[in-house]
Image (cartoon, rainbow, N blue to C red):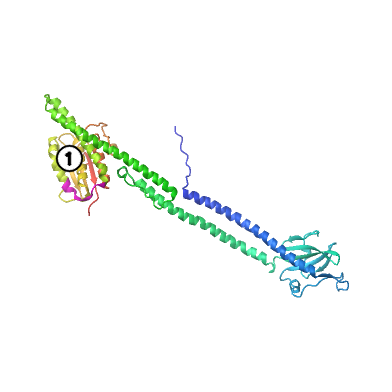
Amino acid sequence: MIAPRRWRWAPSLLTRILLVEALIILIACIVLPLQARSMLGSSVDRIETDMLLSQAQTVAKAVSHDPRASTGNGWQVELDEALRPIYATGYDGRAYAVVDAQQHLLAISRFARPMLWPPIGYAGRMQRFQSGSLVGLSLPVTVAGTPLWVVVTQDQTRPGAVVDDVVRAFLPRYFIWLVTLLLLIPLISGIVLWRSFQKLRHVAQEAAAIRPQALHARLDEAGLPAEAKVLVRATNELLERVQAAFHLQEEFAGNVAHELRTPLAALRVQLGLIEDSAVRDTMARQIERMSHVLSQLRDLASLESADRAEISRLDLSDLAVAQVAEMTPAILAAGRSIAVTGAEQGVPVFGNQVLLTIALQNLIDNALKHTPGGHHIEVSLLPEGGISVADDGPGIAQDDSPHLVRRLWRADQQRSDGAGLGLSIVQRIADVHRGRLEIGKSALGGAQFALFLPLAH
């Protein structure tokens, strides 16, 4: 027992590429903003540290000690006239303080908030600290032989914190532009790939349309990606080898038919020397069958170049009447009758007269060989561009209809009287004319074979 085949999703190449790009975009949308924020944060910290250090150094230069000063401890900060307004108002969020080794506030600006400072530690080196929206820096200095620390702070919620505002404005816009550009990547690549795959689908349709009767066709590689051109060229080379094999087959059939016709003609001459009439008649029938097979092989070989046959406007009625008139004596001699109907009105079609004559002859021969003596064959012209051959014989089984146009196949599984080539020749001629061969039951009760061709309007 064969295990049921599991269904597996097999996405197309385009789907796979777009899925990979979607995954890359998702990762980029997560990683790049975080990386950008980290880099910007590092840059902002460095810029803020430089700004705070510059402020601390400016304040440190303005620190002095005067016992006669109005302040209780004598320490004071004498800023330049241009800097005093900055620390006198809370608009910019800047503040400073001077602290001694015992962490006593020796001098402080109006809007300084020491209660918000984290534990600084007051080491012997510069320290940066942050508490909520407040960032600051402590700078150790020595004034009048006394170790002090100048502490400067910046409230990031105030307008003076320009750098932080730039960061907050930059990141959302950066993320929007990043996502937009990343989404354009699958859109553009999808359009480019879709156009390439459309060409591939077109080539695939061309390949699917190639039939054994049209092996001269080749796939067009123009506009295909270099990777696909390799496959198309290999396919075209395969078609050339197959066409060469078909050519050898048809050539062999033609050579066989040609080589055997002469010995058969000699056998016909020798039949007159046989005195026994029963033996002579049996051999004559066998020679006739062999001659018929050779005629079909000859026709089959001639169809190799049928695709290049000249197609012109002709009247099926004239062709049918002429062919039936030619075959009537042999049909009557075989004990059958034949008639043509519907020939009063012309049926103009596009076709090749020689090929269509071969097709009609094979259809009539087929009806003749599969109906007993005393039966009737009727050739009918159809106004929709067809010609049918029907009989009142035993007909054909419905299951056998699809196999009748196969070479070397007969419903009775025998290979006398033509080797089963007749209907395959008719089917080949129908393909050459872009027509069709329909097989069914006739109104007379037997079989009906109808060949339809393009109307010549």
Query: In terms of image quadrants, where is residue 83?
Result: bottom right
What residue appears at the point 73 percent right and 65 percent down from the top-left corner?
A: 52
Q: How many residues crowd mark 1 within 10 Å: few (<14), some (14–19), many (20+)?
A: many
Q: Which residue has dot 1 on it?
A: 377
Pick whichever, 244 or 214, lies toward us.
Answer: 244
How far across and down, in percent of the image, does residue 98 sit? 81, 66
Query: In terms of image quadrants, where is residue 244?
Result: top left
Is residue 255 depicted above or below 312 in this figure? above
Outermost residue on the right side: it is: 67
Disc 1 is placed on an element classified as: strand
How far across and down, in percent of the image, does residue 310 sit? 23, 49
| 272 part of magenta stretch | no
Is 344 displayed left or right of 452 in the figure? Answer: left
Is residue 98 depicted above or below 455 in this figure? below
What residue appears at the point 57 percent right and 61 percent down from the top-left corner?
A: 176
Magenta residues (range): 308-319
What residue appears at the point 25 percent right and 39 percent down from the top-left corner?
A: 301
Query: In terms of image quadrants, where is residue 288?
Result: top left
Is 38 displayed left or right of 98 in the figure? Answer: left
